[in-house]
Amino acid sequence: MDINGKLYRKFLERNAAYEQQNGKDAAKKQHSKGKLTARERIELLFDAGTFDEIDAFTRTAPAESNFGKVVTAYGDGVIIGHGKIKGRTAFIYSQDFNVMGGSLGSVHASKIAKIQDMALKMGAPIIGIIDSGGARIQEGVASLAGYAGIFRRNVFSSGVIPQISVIMGPAAGGAVYSPSITDFVFMTNKTSHMFVTGPNVVKEVLNEDVSFDELGGAEVHMKKSGVANFVYEDEENTLRGVIKLLSYLPSNNMENPPAIEACDTNIEPAPQMLEIVPDDPNKPYDIKEVIRLLVDKDTFFEYAENYAQNIVVGFGRLKGRTIGIIANQPKVLAGTLDINSSTKAARFIRFCDSFNIPILTLEDVPGFLPGIDQEHNGIIRHGAKLLYAYADATVPKVTVILRKSYGGAYCVMNSKNLGGDFNFAWPTAEIAVMGPEGAVSILYRKELIESEDPAKLKKELAKRYREEIANPYVADEKGFIDEVIDPAVTRRKIIYAFEALENKHVTSPSRKHGNIPL
Ligand code: HXC
């Protein structure tokens, strides 16, 4: 080709026009709001020089029926393409707020759908960076139809490829539902907001004043609604978080998670473990100290760390291999299971099971949280989600009972009969239908009423109950526990257990799908 000729010049001019559209002015607008541009975000996420954009020149045709409000910018407000993240292929769409507020019209939607289809076909993760005012108002029903097509693809891809949403600006109206179907939602503090209806509508309909942050800021979604699973202070760190998360995940459901060169092969006993968990069942401690000692050094990556803190959930590595961890947190609400902790853990288990990630359960739970609020809001059906998720999961499942394991919570937390592959207990474990005090109050009610010193009698009975019933040895002798282990050797035990389960294969009955209690 003649590089001074007309054909090549036209090609260069077209590219230059595109560069100008995404140039300094566009960047200035975003930077003034503390945000990066759609392209800068992509550059931070992908390995240098590996990103290739497609459909950069698609445009929305101007049309009178569009209320005179359509801007015919190149790309129609979204960049799509593929590249490598730490050497592995990933697909992306990144919305450009500078084009009609990142709103979703039909061309914009068809680009997202195209990249979703490609990611699914290639078996690679898809990341959506959302900075959008929602359905493009002037395109009417075509925008709504565009969203519906994206949601449908999100659902088809669920459990096949990891789907990650990163909110880096407004996610209004229709823009919230795709993220909530995806596996993980990241938000950047202060500059991102998610709401179905914004503060103006809230004011109009309910006459209530609420700020963007109060209604749908990152903090609200991390701590109260549970919609956001990872929150970072700025966009650079948010994107680093996405890269870190991907390092634990396989590219699709046919692969195992990538095993990194084992950086921590230590399986020596850790006597410090004995000092973390107090013998006294009423004394709290931080379960994260136990987790950190069990997994490879510095590999624990917590999910939703500020939501339902009575359960701790996240990824870690054992000799370089990814595992998912579910652990009761005795430091918060005594580690009881409530609605939020049940749904948080259930969703995480579903993810791990979809993507061949073995599950480790660390148990110290006095039971379900009692109360009118919990019962009326449906702890029965929400707790059932956790039960269902555990029982339905076919990946290797190992449980260690550290201390309390009472009642329904014993059953739920991956007990042997629910499908636990290896169930270990520490000598401090108390496994029973209920705690000693509660148990003797019911069994010996009459005797306690008639007693001259009921407090003394209750104490004696509780001691006897602990010795005879609420200990790990009864369960061990009945085979509900595979082994009572020295806490110091727990890491070695679980590493060997997961190695033994490496080729676990389960055949499930043929069915369209189960009916998880939603
Ligand atoms: C078309 C939109 C738009 C939209 C914003 N813009 N949202 N254009 N459709 N949904 C345009 C604005 O007109 C403006 O254009 C530019 O984007 C920047 O918007 P500003 O309002 O100036 O920016 P800012 O002050 O930062 O506020 C951002 C915002 C606000 C919070 C997102 O624009 C907003 O509230 N938009 C509407 C959000 C909303 O209610 N969406 C729901 C749509 S219904 P100019 O030309 O001035 O630069 C929906 C239902 C789908 O999504 C349901 C599916 C389940």
Image: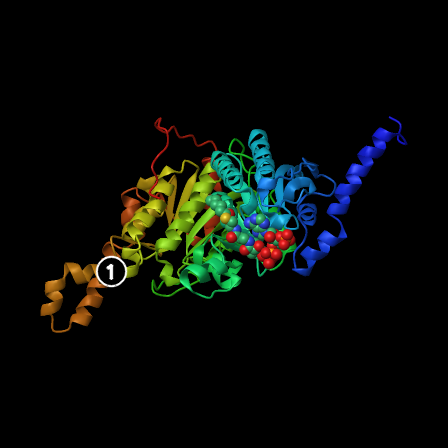
Q: Nearer the viewer, residue 378 or 129?
A: 129
Residue 272 seen in the figure: no
Residue 36: x and y in percent read: 67, 53
**Placement of 500 over or under 195, stated as above or below:** above
Q: Quadrant of residue 392?
A: top left
* Image position of 151 (left or right of 100): left
Q: Quadrant of residue 336?
A: bottom left
Residue 208: x and y in percent read: 43, 65
* Image position of 260 (left or right of 465): right
Residue 493: x and y in percent read: 45, 45
Quarter of the image where the C terminus is located: top left
Graded by Cα atoms within 10 Å as few (under 14), some (14 to 19) or many (20 or more), the crowding at tag 1 reads many
Residue 28: x and y in percent read: 72, 56
Q: Nearer the viewer, residue 217 or 342?
A: 217
Residue tagged 1: 436
**Residue located at (23% from left, 63% from top):** 437
Quarter of the image where the N terminus is located: top right
**Residue located at (52% from left, 31% from top):** 254
Q: Nearer the viewer, residue 181 or 379?
A: 181
